[in-house]
Amino acid sequence: MSKSRLLTNRLMTKLALVFFMLVILMGVSYIFTTIYLTNKHFEERSQKLNAELANHLIEEKFQGNSPFLDDGSVNKPLFGDLMHDMMAVNRGIEVYLLDLSGEILYSVVLSHDNPNDPAQYVNIDPIDEFIDAKGGKYILGDDPRQPEKEKIFSAAKFDHEGKEGYIYIVLAGQESDNVTSSLFSGYFMKLGLGASVLTMVFVLFLGLVSFWFLTKNLRSIIDSVRRFREGDLDIRIENPDKTDLSVLASNFNEMADTIEKNMQEIKSVDTLRRELIANVSHDLRTPLSIISGYIETLQIKKAQLSEEEKDKYLNIIKGSSEKLSHLVSQLFEYSKLEAQQVEPSKEPFAMTDLAMDLVSKYQVFGKEKDIKINLEAEDQVPLVFADISLVERAIQNLLDNALKFTPKKGQISLIVSSDDNEVKIGISDSGPGIKKSDQAIIFDRYRQTRSQASKEGVGLGLAIVKKIMELHNTTIQVVSNPNEGSTFEFYLPKYKIAGL
């Protein structure tokens, strides 16, 4: 069995058990609630049916008989006959004779043999409330035989031959409790056992069927995750927003897209790494071979060479070492930018002044190649807010690139202009231009077009410019057509004085 299927089975089993336990708990709660409410309903019904029982007793039994003897004592034979008559009809009934304070004067169910026993009392308040309501309310009163319980009752007040008191009848006495408890225990066992068996069978069937359908989307997601893990990178959950687990499905699709994108980037980085190794190896090998070759020539033919030849060879060695140093410096600079180890130190400065300094410096290099370099700047260009050294480095790289590809008698222009919020810097040349298909890759690290590949360097100059622009939260773009030259443009924010 696969792990995904095993996981699904475990989840369904747990869900089914939890659901089963909840239903059992609800069933037991329902049984207890039903029994409690049924008992209360039975008590209320019995109390209303027997509400006038105490009055009937007084009217019937006290017509020719007095509840008290001539000496003031309780007429026990009368209450004995009365109790036996009532118990013949209902064994749960208990009759009590009370005085106005609630003291129990006599009852057949209580022992009155010991005159030293403390008097027993019944709370009068429920009795008065019952009499005032004329038996229309469900009221519980004290049970003298079970003081911790309250019972349904019937009560009436009597005034016979100057003696007042209450007839208090407990309608569900101790005998009734015993019978009711036995009946309810049997009823509960039958109901509970039957309900438990039926519930178990019903829940087992219904739970399995329900969870099978409820976990359909989850099983689909698990299967998609398994296929993605096994290498099917194109697998996605269809219509994720319409599934029961839309958040999980959407997150899986986003995760899969991110992983696939990262894998493509890793492959791209690996390809670029191989290109870097090849390009760097080639560019390092050339100056190193030149340096090694001429040093070896100087060592072998030192005595045969003239001073002019020695100077020539040393100049060639110097030039190659400078190229090698420049290459290593570019690699180090780009690695720092890519690792985000460079933090721009932004400050306001005049872009026109920086452009003039750079043009003056590069005009010297332009004369050596017979290339005209000039500045085109608007009047009163506002200050920019940027890292002056990084911006200078970016423009230098762009000018170096323009010098590299502009032929003799060509022209390079450094253009500075502005609009409402930004200052635009452009470097335009009259070189061979760049194909549209190549313009998308010229700013990538170590990527070269065919025309670039014939030049010196590993293609890091424009990649460094791109990184510098990213540090300034801006971009660089190229406008070029074959045989029409190229223009590289970027924008820097204006310096805004606080409060203006």
Image (cartoon, rainbow, N blue to C red):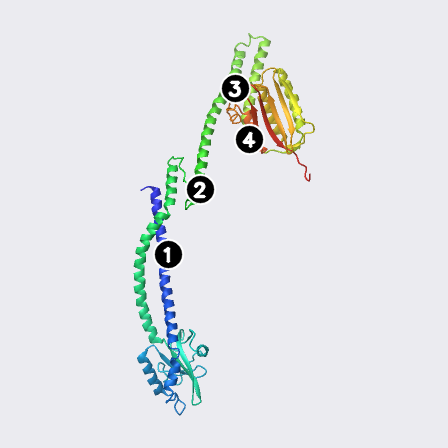
Compute the Cα span from label 2 to label 3: 45 Å
Which label's residue is closer to the chain start, 1 or 2?
A: 1
Q: Which residue is mark 4?
A: 337
Residue 47 rendering spot, x and y as whole percentages? 39, 75
Q: Is residue 272 above or below residue 23?
A: above
Q: Amino acid at mark 4?
A: Leu
Front position in the image: 360 or 197: 197
Q: Which residue is mark 2?
A: 250
Query: Answer yes or no: do the residues labelled 3 and 4 have beta carbons within 8 Å?
Result: no
Q: Residue at x 45, y 39 (%)?
A: 254
Compute the Cα span from label 3 to label 4: 26 Å
Compute the Cα span from label 1 to label 3: 76 Å
Compute the Cα span from label 1 to label 2: 31 Å
Q: Which residue is mark 3?
A: 451
> Secondary structure under badge 1?
helix
> Secondary structure under badge 2?
helix
